[in-house]
Every structure is written in structure tokens, then in C-alpha cells.
Image (cartoon, rainbow, N blue to C red):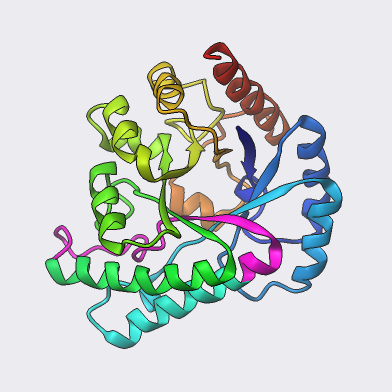
Amino acid sequence: MKYGMNLLLWSDHLNEGLLPVLDRLKQLGYDGVELPLFSTAIPEMERWNKRFNDLGLERTAVTIRTEPNNPISPAAKVRAAGIEASKRTLECCQALGVQNLCGPYHSAIGLFSGSGPTADEWKWGVESMRAVAEHAQTCGVMLALEAVNRYETFLMNCMADAVRFVAEVDHPHCRLMYDTFHANIEEKSIAEAIGTVAPYLVHIHISESDRSTPGTAQVNWEESFDTFHKIGYDGWMVVEAFGLALPEITAATKIWRRMYHAEDQLAHDALAFMKDEVQKRR
């Protein structure tokens, strides 16, 4: 198992202020960090790559698409912009040494039509993602698409939909991730959901029901870790938690109150929680 921490708890972009955070995460025992890649204007990517390597921290990344580059837009130019945005992000991943690119970049986050996906929107999404997957293979990066809850997107909300989507994309560099927060909202059976995604699963977000310290709220962790063990999962487990440090992220995640003592404490407790749950099942 590889254990990671999403840097969105501290920042939505790479910056010098993260250096002490990276050092502390390494000292705590994390194998890697998840980089927010919401812009491709990242200076000195080769230098950042070296910094991560010098610290011994592996990398995954997360990104999104928005209305101007929505891969399922009825406008061909907008869909093309979505493909190009994801390709540029993949090139950043390659420069930064990122292994998996996760997130709901299959469609625009927070953009709704008032109904579920049409046949055309689904088809456009599959076609767009197949083009992105071809570039991902060239860059040596694995796509880890994320199904997110109904309040954030309408294309892909549950594991059954996600598996159908990736099966239609039909590319070895297009796979799926599982997020405990979103599954807690959308799935009727956690064990069934994890079993469904198992053949395509390359990444897991360990995220509590209130986005705070994993193990402190309502996610069914026993069933989750039992099933991760049952399917033999041995890839990335990355903590995804959010706080009040970033106004745009606070607004997007609808977090209005502080639900943990301190970022470092959350990182410490989350790693201990994951390792303990995995160890109990060996």
C-alpha cells in the first residue's frame, strides 16, 4: 500500500510555502503527496520534481474541468478545449513525476442541465476521454476518473456508471478511483460498490463524511476496509480533507466551520488510522 496526502488542505497550487509541509509529511511517514493541478502555468516544474525526489515523496495529482472546457459540451470547440486542457495537465504530470491523475475531469464540475446525461453527452464524454487516454499513455500517466456526488456533477455519480463509462472508453490508461466521501452519499452498498469498481480500481481517496479527519464521523470504515482487503487492493490511499484556509475551495466544498484541531494533527491521525485499518486485516 502507498499512503498519500492531498495538498489541498494547505494550498490549491504549488508554492514555496509548501516546502515545510512537504518535509513534515515525509517525517510523518507518508509515501507521497497529491498535487492540485488546476492550472498548467506551473513555473520550474523540473525543480519541483527534483525537490519531491530529494524528499523521497512520490506524486499523484488531481484536476477538474469547468464550463469553458467542458468535455461533454454540445459545442465542439468547448469539447476540444477540454481535451487540450487535460492533455496539458498530463504534460505537467509527466514533468512533475506524477503517477495517477485523479478527479472528475470527465465533465465540468458544478455545471448542471437539470437532468441526467443525455445519450449525446455520454457519447461526447467517452470520445473526449479516449483522446485524453491516448495522450496519458504517451506521457506515462494513469487516468483515475472520479465519480462524484449529485451535488457536484451529473455525468457520473456512482461506481456502476463509472465502470460503464471506462469500459466504453476502452483504453488501458483510463481507469477509476473510489472516494469514500462520495460513495457515502451515493451508494446503496459500500461492499457492492467497491466490488463493482475493483477491476478498474487504481486509486482511493480516504475522505470522511464531513471532510475532516478520517475515522471521526459517519463513513462505514469497517465495511470499506474489509472490502478493500477482500479485493486485494494494494495501490494508493490518499487522504482528502478540506478546511477553511482556501476561500475558493471552502466555497466549492461548502465547508463553513472548522472540524479539526490543526492540519498537522489531521495528517498525523489520518495516516495512523489508515495504517491501523490495513494492518488489522493482514
Task: Say if residue 39 shows up in the picture.
Answer: no
In the current view of this chain or complex, which residue is farthest to the top?
280
Question: In the rendered view, does 7 fall on the left or right side of 220?
Answer: right
- Point out the stretch of residues depicted in magenta: 92-118
Say above or below: 78 vs 240: below
Where's the N terminus, which quadrant?
Answer: top right
State which quadrant residue 133 falls in. Answer: bottom left
Horizontal and vertical percent for residue 215?
52, 21
Front residue of this view, candidates 180 and 216: 180
Say above or below: 221 vs 203: above
Horizontal and vertical percent for residue 80?
37, 83
Residue at position x 56%, y 11% in the image: 280
Numbered circles on residues, count: 0
Residue at position x 51%, y 50% in the image: 250
Where's the C terminus, which quadrant?
Answer: top right
Horizontal and vertical percent for residue 115?
14, 59
Residue at position x 64%, y 58% in the image: 98
Front residue of this view, candidates 14 and 165: 165
Task: Say if residue 133 shows up in the picture.
Answer: yes
Q: Does the magenta stretch include residue 245?
A: no
Horizontal and vertical percent for residue 52?
79, 53
Question: In the rendered view, does 68 fall on the left or right side of 272?
Answer: left
State which quadrant residue 265 falls in. Answer: top right
Q: Does the magenta stretch include residue 112?
A: yes
State which quadrant residue 183 falls in. Answer: top left
In the current view of this chain or complex, which residue is farthest to the right?
54
In the current view of this chain or complex, which residue is farthest to the bottom?
77
Residue at position x 66%, y 54% in the image: 11
Front residue of this view, candidates 165 and 5: 165
